[in-house]
């Protein structure tokens, strides 16, 4: 059974969250994710073809990974057209978003999911940009990770 509390990891570059979704027949959480591709431009600019931003592609791959993780714990991922993530979405331009429903996942799934999402996004983004970046071994606090990404933008920015 999923928890009734939301799980969130948000900074100026990315966000991942799972929050209860109103459904009377099943235990359902709404997975919300996004990446601010404008903030990642110092790293990604010139390292991809048009319409192939590395950070956006990274978020799409993370979404596939979340589906795989959900299935591995007996949960059911389900595509959803509506976006009920407005409470967690940072208000600014440049955000690419992904969201889906996760049905009947154990409560422990959501902390593991958020940890996976953040590190997998960074790993895939830096790999696609062909940058050898040593990522933190454990997930830092959102503001600490923001400082880390800002340093990478200054170091690798074109």
Image (cartoon, rainbow, N blue to C red):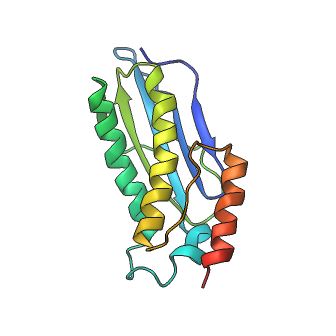
Residue at point 64%, 52% (across, down): 90
Which percent across, then down, holds residue 124?
42, 60
Q: Quadrant of the C terminus?
A: bottom right
Q: Quadrant of the N terminus?
A: top left
Q: Is residue 24 above or below residue 45?
A: above
Q: Is residue 94 above or below residue 1?
A: below
Q: Is residue 86 above or below residue 111?
A: below
Q: Number of callouts in the render?
A: 0
Which percent across, then down, holds residue 21?
46, 27
Q: 68 or 51: which is nearer to us? A: 68
Residue at point 58%, 42% (across, down): 138
Q: 21 or 15: which is nearer to us? A: 15
Tell me which corner region of the image, top left, top right, bottom left or bottom right, holds residue 86. Answer: top right
Which percent across, then down, holds residue 39?
62, 68
Tell me which corner region of the image, top left, top right, bottom left or bottom right, holds residue 105. Answer: top left
Q: With 64 as the anchor, is 122 left or right in this view?
A: right
Q: Is residue 125 visible?
A: yes
Q: 128 or 67: which is nearer to us? A: 128
Q: With 74 as the anchor, is 132 left or right in this view?
A: right
Which percent across, then down, holds residue 48?
41, 79
Residue at point 39%, 82% (across, down): 50
Residue at point 31%, 25% (across, down): 73
Q: Is residue 79 visible?
A: no
Tell me which corner region of the image, top left, top right, bottom left or bottom right, holds residue 157. Answer: bottom right
């Amino acid at each position: 059974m999923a928890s009734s509390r939301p799980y969130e990891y948000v900074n100026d570059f990315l966000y991942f969250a799972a929050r209860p979704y109103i459904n009377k027949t099943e235990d359902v959480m709404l997975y919300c994710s996004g990446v601010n591709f404008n903030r990642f431009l110092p790293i990604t600019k010139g390292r991809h073809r048009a319409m192939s931003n590395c950070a956006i592609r990274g978020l799409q791959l993370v979404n596939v990974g979340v589906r795989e993780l959900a299935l591995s714990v007996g949960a059911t991922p389900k595509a959803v057209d509506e976006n009920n993530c407005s409470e967690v979405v940072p208000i600014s331009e440049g955000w690419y978003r992904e969201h889906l429903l996760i049905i009947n996942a154990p409560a422990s799934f959501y902390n593991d999911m958020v940890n996976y999402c953040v590190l997998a996004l960074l790993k895939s983004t830096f790999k696609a940009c062909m940058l050898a970046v040593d990522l933190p071994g454990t997930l830092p606090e959102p503001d600490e990770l923001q400082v880390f990404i800002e340093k990478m933008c200054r170091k690798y920015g074109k």
